[in-house]
Image (cartoon, rainbow, N blue to C red):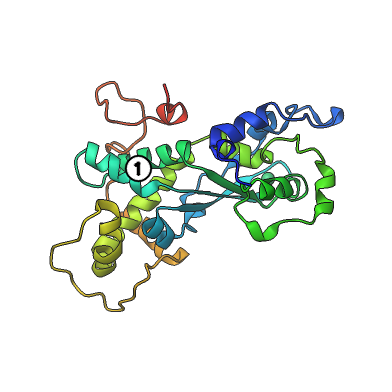
């Protein structure tokens, strides 16, 4: 049974804030998983974000992303999925300049992340043995196929340990990684526009602007109905963007606080979207 109320990221966080503590001898770095999350770090490299399924993003508006988290005991991958990105992006573009800009992607991601149902998964043992069972039952686990046997719920018999391991709670409670993700998407769109104009015209442009691309299109050498979305294509688009000027210091897309330009988004605002 799907519990709609509990699927939003704030609900998952709230349920985890009041969850069971760790055992008494394991509380030095935080009593429960929510407190303990700050001892892990989301990897900063944009390269870690290159596994986005661009076909799903521009076809269905669903963002599936894998984030590498450096934990206290090892490196794990938190997978996250949420929908409604394209609708929110379209709203942002219409309210703004009518053209795709990096800040519109950031705001659309943030809006979708805050308001859409979110699905989560982590590769750590804590998730597997204490959360996978209950999150699958509640339709919150992103990877349904990994549902553990009933026996494994013994480590969390009454579902009292919150809605995720400390790595998931770290990713859910912190949205600064969305700015890096937005850059990856922005680079990809610009790269495709320059180098794969037909795919851009057929798939990406209509998804972003909700209308047909009307200018003459140069045929791609290898035309298919699928976007180039493997890691290589996304890596190449990021390298390509780094050779251009838009992400160098001093440009308008540095996410620093600015008194003079109210349109600029700061990391502070991203962390506190309601402030
Ligand atoms: Zn984990």
Q: Position of residue 37 (x, y in %)?
A: 65, 34
Which residue is more in the foreground, 16 or 265? 16
- Asked whether the viewer can see residue 64, the reply is yes
Q: Give percent across and percent down for residue 163.
A: 66, 38
Q: Residue 89's quadrant in the figure?
A: top left
Instruction: Decide if residue 62 is on the left or right side of residue 206.
Output: right
- Marks counted in the figure total 1
- Which residue is outermost to the front? 1
Q: Which quadrant of the frame does ligand 1 lie within?
A: top right
Q: Position of residue 26 (x, y in %)?
A: 82, 31
Task: Note whether residue 248 is visible.
Answer: no
Q: Residue at x 20, y 60 (%)?
A: 212
Query: In the rendered image, which quarter contains the C terminus?
Result: top left
Q: Residue furthest left?
A: 215
- Comparing 13 with 246, the one in front is 13
Which one is nearer the viewer's eye here, 104 or 92?
Answer: 92
Q: Residue at x 34, y 76 (%)?
A: 224
Quadrant of residue 110 within the rendered picture: top left
Residue behind mark 1 = 88
Numbered disc 1: secondary structure: helix
**x, y (%) of residue 97?**
19, 40
Lateral position of residue 149 relative to residue 87, left or right: right
- Indicate left or right for 43 with 253 as reference: right
Identified at 31% across, 25% down, the residue is: 258
Local crowd size for mark 1, using a 10 Å CA cut-off: few (<14), some (14–19), many (≥20) = many
Q: Is residue 275 left or right of residue 24?
A: left
């Amino acid at each position: 049974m799907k519990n709609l109320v509990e699927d939003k990221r704030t609900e998952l966080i709230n349920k985890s804030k009041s969850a069971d503590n760790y055992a008494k001898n394991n509380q030095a770095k935080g009593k429960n998983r929510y407190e303990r999350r700050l001892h892990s770090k989301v990897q900063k490299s944009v390269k870690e974000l290159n596994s986005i399924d661009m076909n799903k993003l521009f076809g269905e508006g669903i963002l599936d992303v894998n984030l590498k988290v450096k934990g206290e005991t090892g490196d794990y991958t938190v997978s996250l999925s949420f929908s409604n990105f394209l609708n929110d992006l379209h709203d942002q573009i219409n309210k703004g300049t009518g053209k795709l800009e990096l800040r519109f992607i950031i705001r659309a991601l943030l809006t979708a992340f805050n308001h859409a149902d979110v699905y989560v998964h982590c590769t750590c043992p804590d998730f597997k043995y204490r959360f996978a069972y209950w999150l699958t039952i509640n339709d919150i686990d992103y990877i349904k196929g990994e549902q553990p046997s009933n026996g494994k719920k013994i480590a969390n018999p009454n579902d009292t340990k919150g809605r995720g391991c400390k790595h998931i709670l770290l990713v859910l409670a912190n949205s600064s990684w969305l700015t890096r993700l937005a850059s990856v998407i922005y680079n990809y769109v610009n790269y495709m526009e320059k180098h794969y104009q037909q795919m851009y015209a057929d798939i990406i442009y209509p998804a972003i602007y909700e209308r047909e691309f009307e200018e003459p299109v140069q045929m791609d050498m290898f035309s298919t109905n699928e976007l180039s979305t493997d890691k290589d294509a996304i890596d190449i688009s990021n390298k390509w963007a780094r050779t251009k000027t838009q992400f160098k210091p001093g440009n308008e897309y540095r996410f620093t606080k600015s008194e003079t330009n109210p349109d600029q988004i700061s990391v502070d605002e991203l962390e506190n979207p309601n402030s």
